[in-house]
Amino acid sequence: MAQTICHLFEAPGNRPVVAGWIYEAFWFGQDGYTPEFFETRLTESRDPNNIPLSLLALDEGEPAGIVNLIVNDDPERPHLTPWLAALYVDPPFRGRGHAVNLSRRLLQEAARLDCPAVYLGTHIPDFYKRFGATVHEDVADDFWILRIATDGIE
């Protein structure tokens, strides 16, 4: 099984499918957001040396998952930057390691860009502990802001 990760701008034909994933998984039904909105936002990820970055997992050439490195994912916390955002693996491709591989690659890219840490909001903090994630803030009973240091990420 051939799995690869590339920058989304290297496979722009997958942008509509990825935008649909992000909309359906994270923003469905919220006013002002459409798949087209996210497709436009994803076009901003066009330079591997600047944030935002969008990384696409491919499985046998088929789009399998996405993760993004963005400046900020929480307007109430503008001092926290950058953020891991919209980690998603399409259901037929789950259980194959794509989420781990996408997360690791994103952290490597953040380190390459001299980001000492990455932040994210999640309902599943245990997944990110394998990367050294620590709780930065308890937001609710089932939601946390995590911080992952990028030094030592392999």
Image: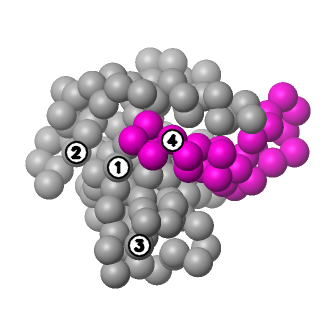
Q: Is residue 133 above or below residue 97?
A: above
Per the image, is 41 magenta? no
Q: Secondary structure at mark 1?
A: strand
Which numbered marker is on residue 60? 3
Q: Disc number at residue 57?
A: none
Q: Which residue is mark 2?
A: 108
Residue plotted at (26% across, 39% down): 109
Q: Which circle marks residue 6 in the picture?
A: 1
Above or below: residue 135 compared with residue 34: below
Q: Of marks 3 and 1, which one's residue comes earlier in the chain?
A: 1
Which comes sooner in the sequence, label 2 or label 4? Answer: 4
Q: CA distance from mark 2 to mark 1?
A: 13 Å
Q: How is the image coloured?
A: one colour
Is residue 22 shown to the viewer in this render? no
Mark 3, Cα crowd under 10 Å, few <14 / some 14-19 / many 20+, is: few
Whole-percent x, y for residue 22 in the image = 65, 48
Give the alpha-carbon distance from disc 2 to disc 4, as whole Å: 22 Å
Q: Which mark is residue 12?
A: 4
* Disc with the residue nearer the chain's start (2 vs 1): 1
Foreground tag (3 vs 2): 3
Q: Amino acid at mark 4?
A: Pro
